[in-house]
Image (cartoon, rainbow, N blue to C red):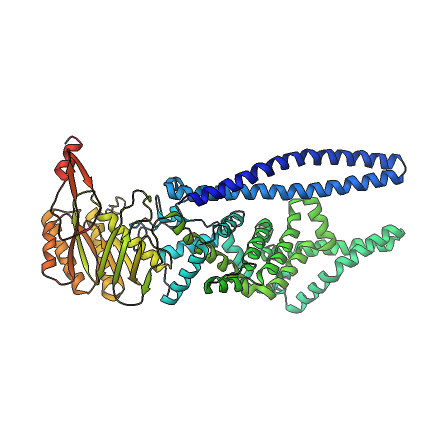
């Protein structure tokens, strides 16, 4: 499976070696060309602008410009090759298991109160987010996390997402391009504030002059539009023709402009917001937008997202131009001179105002569309790093999960054990020995149902399922600060599941080792009561247990069925096949395991 990525790496390593050598050699040639240009310029002045000196200077100047452009483009090619190689190496890491060492675990999305996120390893250490996240922008990151934590798509939307993800999964080169260019942007919470600023279309004139009447604001606007040109003309003309009156008038105008800049600096600075910090990001967005809008898609979802971006390229270029003008703030002397002579900041603010009047109502959808595409790209990697995947059939109604070859996507391809499953509004009581695979199987069910709900591929050879809402009770811990014991924490979680079951016909619950935090008598009585109540509420789900007495519930209720995982022993060693079997468990291994560790 990793051969496809290794072939891409080999291709770009060859290109990188060639381009790197050429890049280094061009650097030396560029230096020589610049030195030759300096010599020619010196000769030009020394010869009194002789024809030969003019020709030589022109030739070396042209050569320097050409070499500079060529060198710059080669630098971009080298960076691109390195970026694609890094992307493919990360994909190989997803296949080999090295993904678990990645730093990004989606820490900001961890919520222990979430219905399933921590129990199913959706975010956090060794999580699905850590495994498959390839987003690079703030909006992409939020979209991918939202698709994992809060997928709420209709059946029609799920089918559209499946088509889009399937289309993207077949073109690794294109998704590599998307990842590389978006990686040049990076993720920052400021991006969200920036987009909010862009969507605020309140006219600048309402904020000018300390909130004075609009008539005065219009006067200010008139002065801003024409006074800078008059100021420059007066000062230049006065200097050229040595006319003191023109110089004095120009100086007065410059003083008025300086006062105007000072009076309006707070309003202008607030209006410009984050513009000055993001010029480099905006340019990268233009590249991505053009990459997407020049692409022909077959899926309806991607075609619609592309259509939302059709006017974005021109608009973002204009926005980048405004932001670039503000970059002069990094040079205080130039910045002060521009504001005194040309009212530079106020001029930029009015450019932004005109931009907002034209585009503010579209800005949010552009960045949201790019984020959504990033999320779809992330899901599209699953069939390229995980064996035996399919696009499930998701139905709206019932409580069905029928699957063949159902496996956990976070387990390596070589060690993954898959199971078949037939589930139709049941409650499965899953019994079995320690480490036999009960909990992993329930997580397998949960994460694949989540992927199906998000419109993604699932780790199964075949799968048909209802549009389930998932809720779990697995990793229950005490809270010393709140004085909450493990058992009380589990009681609270089970109560939450019962309350959800009363009003949600699409619920599926996954409860691991129910009431393990209390004594065997109370545990059995409590588990019996909870499962019986869930059965009466017509809830569907799975409960794992070591208490074989609970398996008797299967004989009392038609919807409750027993399944088990077991082990076998050979030559004094214990072996697990991690296969689910019909019926209750017949084996135990606690004593054997205690002997293994010397107890």
Residue 491 lies, in percent from the top left, at 20, 53
Q: Is residue 252 above or below residue 67?
A: below
Task: Look at 11% across and 50% down and name the residue there.
Answer: 548
Residue 338 lies, in percent from the top left, at 71, 51
Residue 318 lies, in percent from the top left, at 63, 58
Horizontally, residue 466 falls left or right of residue 556, namely right
Looking at this rendering, what residue extends furthest in the bottom direction? 215
In the image, 218 versus 88, the foreground residue is 88
- Residue 40 visible somewhere in the drawing: yes
Residue 74 lies, in percent from the top left, at 62, 42
Looking at this rendering, what residue extends furthest in the top direction? 598
Q: Quadrant of residue 159?
A: bottom left
Q: Which image quarter is the C terminus in?
A: top left
Q: Which image quarter is the N terminus in?
A: top left
- Residue 188 visible somewhere in the drawing: no
In the image, 25 versus 536, the foreground residue is 25
In the image, 217 versus 315, the foreground residue is 315
Horizontally, residue 432 falls left or right of residue 180, namely left
Q: Quadrant of residue 461?
A: bottom left
Task: Look at 61% across and 35% down and name the residue there.
Answer: 21
């Amino acid at each position: 499976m990793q051969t496809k990525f290794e072939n891409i790496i080999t291709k770009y390593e060859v290109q990188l070696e060639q381009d790197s050598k050429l890049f280094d050699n061009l650097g030396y040639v560029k230096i020589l060309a610049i030195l030759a240009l300096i010599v020619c310029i010196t000769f030009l002045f020394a010869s009194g602008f002789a024809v030969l000196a003019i020709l030589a200077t022109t030739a070396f100047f042209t050569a320097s410009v050409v070499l500079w452009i060529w060198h710059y483009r080669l630098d971009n090619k080298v960076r691109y090759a390195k970026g694609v190689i890094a992307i493919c190496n990360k994909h190989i890491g997803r296949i080999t298991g090295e993904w678990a060492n990645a730093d990004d675990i989606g820490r900001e999305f961890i919520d222990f109160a979430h219905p399933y996120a921590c129990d199913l390893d959706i975010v956090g250490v060794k999580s699905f987010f850590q495994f498959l996240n390839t987003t690079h922008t703030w909006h992409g990151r939020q979209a991918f996390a939202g698709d994992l934590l809060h997928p709420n798509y209709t059946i029609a939307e799920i089918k559209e997402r499946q088509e889009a993800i399937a289309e993207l999964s077949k073109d690794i080169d294109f998704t590599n391009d998307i990842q590389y260019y978006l990686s040049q942007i990076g993720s920052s919470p400021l991006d969200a504030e920036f987009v909010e600023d862009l969507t605020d279309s309140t006219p600048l004139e309402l904020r000018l002059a300390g909130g004075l009447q609009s008539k005065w604001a219009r006067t200010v606007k008139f002065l801003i539009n024409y006074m800078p040109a008059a100021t420059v003309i007066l000062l230049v003309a006065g200097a050229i023709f040595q006319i003191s009156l023109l110089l004095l008038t120009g100086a007065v105008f410059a003083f008025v402009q300086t006062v105007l800049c000072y009076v309006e600096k707070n309003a202008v600075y607030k209006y410009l917001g984050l513009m000055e910090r993001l010029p480099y990001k905006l340019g990268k967005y233009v590249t991505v937008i053009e990459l997407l809008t020049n692409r022909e898609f077959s899926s309806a979802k991607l075609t619609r997202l592309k259509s939302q971006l059709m006017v974005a390229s021109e608009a973002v270029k204009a926005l980048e131009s405004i932001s670039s003008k503000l970059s002069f703030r990094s040079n205080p002397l130039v910045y002060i001179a521009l504001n005194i002579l040309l009212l530079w900041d106020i001029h930029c603010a009015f450019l932004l105002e005109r931009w907002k009047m034209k585009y503010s109502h579209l800005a949010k959808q552009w960045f949201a569309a790019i984020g959504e595409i990033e999320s779809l790209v992330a899901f599209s990697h699953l069939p390229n790093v995980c064996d035996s995947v399919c696009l499930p059939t998701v139905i709206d109604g019932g409580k069905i999960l029928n699957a063949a070859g159902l496996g956990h996507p976070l387990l390596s391809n070589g060690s993954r054990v898959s199971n078949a499953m037939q589930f139709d509004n049941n409650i499965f009581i899953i019994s079995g020995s320690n480490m036999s695979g009960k909990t992993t199987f329930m997580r397998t069910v949960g994460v694949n149902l989540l992927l199906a709900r998000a419109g993604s591929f699932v780790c199964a050879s075949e799968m048909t399922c209802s549009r389930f809402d998932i809720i779990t009770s697995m990793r229950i811990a005490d809270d010393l600060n709140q004085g909450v014991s493990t058992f009380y924490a589990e009681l609270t979680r089970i109560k939450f599941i019962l309350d959800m079951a009363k009003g949600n016909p699409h619920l599926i619950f996954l409860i691991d080792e129910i009431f393990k935090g209390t004594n065997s008598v109370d545990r059995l009585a409590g588990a019996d009561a909870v499962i019986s109540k869930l059965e009466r509420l017509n809830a569907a789900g799975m409960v794992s247990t070591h208490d074989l007495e609970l398996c008797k519930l299967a004989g009392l209720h038609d919807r409750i069925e027993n399944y088990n995982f077991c082990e076998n022993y050979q030559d004094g060693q214990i072996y697990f096949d991690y296969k689910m079997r019909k019926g209750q468990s017949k084996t135990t291994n606690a004593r054997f395991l205690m002997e293994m560790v010397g107890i």
